[in-house]
Image (cartoon, rainbow, N blue to C red):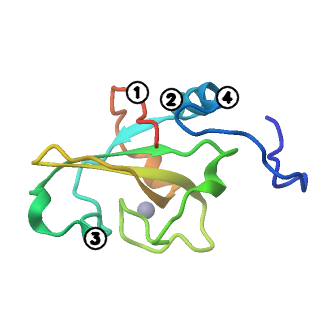
Amino acid sequence: MNRSAEENGVVDEKDYSLDGKDRAEWDQAWASMPHRRLLAPPKIDVAGSLGSGCGELVSTTISEDPPQFSSKAWRPSENCPVCGVSTVGMQRLPASLHPTFAGGLSYGLGVWVHRSCFDGCPEAGEPSPIPW
Ligand SMILES: [Zn+2]
C-alpha cells in the first residue's frame, strides 16, 4: 500500500475530478472496496437538510472508504450508523453511507463505522458507488 501524499508532506496534485487525469485511479479504488447492506434503518440522521420532499428511506448500503482517499471525506457524525454508539476511541473504519429514498434520490454520506458492525452487515451484492 502506498503512503498517502499527505503523510509524506507532499502537496497532492492529483486530479480526481470527473474528467481529471487521475479519475480512473479514483474510480478503481472506490469500486474495489467492500460494499454492504444495512439490515435496519441507519441510527444516524441521513435525511438532514434534504427535508421531507425526498420521500421515505427505502434502503441503505455502506461501503468502506479507500484508505488513501479517506481524508477527503467530511464525516459530520462520529456515531456508528449501524448501532448508533460513538466510534471515538474504538476500532472503526472510514466509510460512506448510501441511503436511497422512495423518490429515487440516493447520495453518499461520510461516516465512521465500528469494524465489527461493518463486518456484521451482509454483502450488498453490487459494486460500491463511486462518489462525485
Ligand atoms: Zn457500531
* CA separation in Å, label 2 and label 3: 26 Å
Q: Position of residue 66 (x, y in %)?
A: 61, 41
Which is closer to the viewer, label 4 or label 3? 4
| Labels 1 and 2 touching (C-beta < 8 A) | yes
- Marking on residue 48: 3
Label 2 neighbour load within 10 Å: few <14, some 14-19, many 20+: some
Earlier sequence position, callout 1 versus callout 2: 2
**Label at residue 31:** 2
Type of amino acid at the residue the image marks with label 1: Pro
Label 2 – label 4 distance at C-alpha: 18 Å
Badge 3 element:
helix
The numbered mark at residue 127 is 1
121 displayed left or right of 1: left
Q: Give how far apart the Cα atoms at labels 1 and 2 are.
A: 6 Å
Rendered residue at 57%/39% (across/down)? 17
Name the residue type under label 4: Lys
Q: Position of residue 111 (x, y in %)?
A: 47, 60
From the viewer's perspective, is 128 left or right of 49?
Answer: right
Sequence-wise first label, 4 or 3: 4
Label 4: few (<14), some or many (≥20) within 10 Å? few
What residue did someone put label 4 on? 21
Secondary structure category for the residue under label 1 = loop
